[in-house]
């Protein structure tokens, strides 16, 4: 167990832990000094089950989107990353939508991607949009694997997604004040603002998790593991949610 007092920075201009009220007010996933990060006691890591040829960088970049939202109170625009899973789900982090209006999704060419909000969970810090099948070729999910040298993708800047190197330090359980227990990954990587929601990839290009926070003053950060993403996608089929508005 790591000591209490570990400080995490959620990748947004400013995220304050608030009471979750309706769907528009979301709790920041990891923005307080009393965040408690507990490590998993695990057996040997499971090998990746991704089959077939490795996914090329062009498909990875095409499956990584930019999520833009405007803060209702300030009018400031915040950017995050998102990823297409399989062929009809777009996954990103929920904390980016806190106090924001209708989100906009953009592909690597800057074109707007039409999608429907189907799932929003502040405890898992995940949001899922439904994409019309066949519009974008998505990436498969990968279980916890033996790879330590991995990559992650950021679409923080308007000039397109960027693939970066990272190292998995450990698989963990992540909580905030005992709330929102979820499977996570600690990474050694220079996580920066706008990287939240970007996919962490195994050697085959399958998604091990999505980035959601950085450790203040360090070159490490955190990702939400693929098992949580799978649960969110499975829950998202229950029906559409109204889009957020200011």
Image: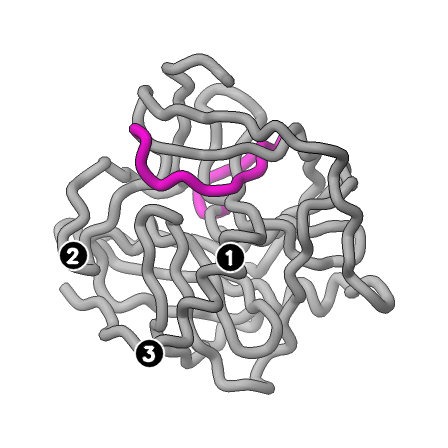
- Which residue is farthest right? 53
> Magenta residues?
177-195
* Vertical comparison of 232 with 37: above or below: below
Viewer-proximal residue among 13 and 2: 2
State which mark lies toward you, 3 or 2.
3
Residue at numbered disc 3: 239
Residue at numbered disc 2: 72
Label 1 sits on a secondary structure element that is: helix
Residue 154: image location, x then y, percent: 56, 51
Residue 226: image location, x then y, percent: 58, 53
Question: Quick check: marks 2 and 1 in contact, CB under 8 Å?
Answer: no
Question: Quick check: marks 3 and 1 in contact, CB under 8 Å?
Answer: no
User: Is residue 11 in the magenta section?
Assistant: no
Residue for point 42% across, 18% down: 6
Q: Is residue 147 left or right of residue 15?
A: right
Specify the label residue 229 is tagged with.
1
Q: For the C terminus, give its image quadrant.
A: bottom left
Viewer-proximal residue among 228 and 28: 228
User: Is residue 192 in the magenta section?
Assistant: yes
Residue 84: image location, x then y, percent: 56, 68
Disc 1 crowd rating (10 Å Cα; few below 14, some 14-19, many 20+) is many
State which mark lies toward you, 2 or 1.
1
Q: Is residue 129 left or right of residue 31?
A: right
Spatial CA distance of label 3 from label 2 is: 26 Å
Specify which label sits upstream in the sequence, 3 or 2. 2
Spatial CA distance of label 2 from label 1 is: 27 Å
Residue for point 48% across, 60% down: 231
Q: Is residue 213 left or right of residue 149?
A: left
Looking at the image, can residue 153 be seen?
Answer: yes
Spatial CA distance of label 3 from label 1 is: 17 Å
């Amino acid at each position: 167990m790591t000591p209490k007092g570990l400080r995490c920075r959620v990748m947004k201009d400013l995220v304050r832990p608030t009471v979750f009220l309706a769907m528009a007010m979301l709790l920041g996933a990891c923005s307080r000094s009393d965040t408690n990060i507990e490590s998993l006691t695990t057996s040997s890591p499971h090998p990746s089950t991704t089959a077939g040829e490795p996914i090329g960088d062009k498909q990875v970049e095409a499956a990584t989107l930019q999520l833009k939202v405007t803060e209702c109170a300030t009018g400031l625009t915040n950017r995050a990353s998102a990823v297409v899973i399989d062929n009809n789900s777009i996954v990103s982090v929920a904390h980016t939508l806190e106090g924001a209006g209708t989100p906009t999704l953009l592909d690597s060419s800057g074109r707007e991607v039409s999608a429907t909000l189907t799932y929003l969970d502040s405890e898992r810090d995940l949001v899922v949009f439904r994409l019309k099948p066949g519009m974008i070729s998505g990436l498969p999910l990968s279980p916890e694997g033996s790879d330590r040298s991995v990559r992650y993708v950021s679409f923080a800047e308007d000039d397109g997604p960027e693939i970066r190197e990272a190292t998995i330090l450990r698989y963990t359980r992540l909580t905030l004040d005992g709330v929102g227990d979820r499977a996570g990954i600690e990474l050694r990587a220079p996580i920066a603002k706008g990287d939240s929601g970007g996919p962490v990839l195994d050697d085959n290009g399958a998604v091990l998790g999505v980035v959601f926070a950085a450790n203040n003053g360090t070159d490490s950060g955190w990702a939400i593991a693929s098992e949580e993403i799978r649960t969110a996608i499975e829950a998202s089929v229950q029906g559409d949610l109204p889009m957020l508005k200011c």
